[in-house]
Amino acid sequence: MMLRMTGTLLLITGILTAGAGIGLLFPRQIVASFLGDQAPTSTTQLLARHWCLLVALVGGLLIYAAFHAEIRVPVMIVAATEKLVLGGLVIASPLRARPLTLAVVGADGVMAILYVATLLSR
């Protein structure tokens, strides 16, 4: 059953992940919401934009993989790695006290676990 739903899983989680692209337009708000920095420097905003782009690209790959089974395994490995590492970094930092940030890495953790479960059920 898990393998039958892989395309749907990738499409839904890809759309959610690609949503990080909004930070390209609103880096100041992203930094304030997730990091708590109300007056980010231009360097911090540049890094936030870059991070948002990279995460949105992972989301784009997940969406693409939803319709192209031949690339699903490497895309799920990359996405699970990105999500689990971000979660680990947040949990190991003071950012774990920020509810919104914790909710995002929690959702990412669930997505990563679903990817790993799907890969192991092959």
Image (cartoon, rainbow, N blue to C red):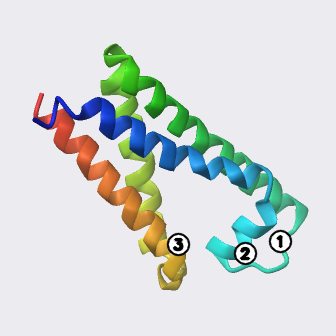
- Alpha carbon separation for disc pair 1 and 2: 8 Å
| Residue 72 locus on image (x, y percent) | 33, 24
Which one is in front, 54 or 43?
Answer: 54
Q: Nearer the viewer, mark 1 or mark 2?
A: 2
Label 3 belongs to which residue? Answer: 101
Marks 1 and 2 in Cβ contact (< 8 Å):
yes
Residue lying at the far top of the rendered structure:
70
| Residue 4 locus on image (x, y percent) | 17, 29
Q: State the SS at label 3.
A: helix
Label 1 belongs to which residue? Answer: 40
Q: State the SS at label 1.
A: loop
| Between discs 3 and 2, the one toward the N terminus | 2
60 relative to 16, above or below: above
Label 2 belongs to which residue? Answer: 32
Give the amino acid type for the residue marked by disc 3 in the picture.
Thr
In this image, 110 relative to 49: left or right? left
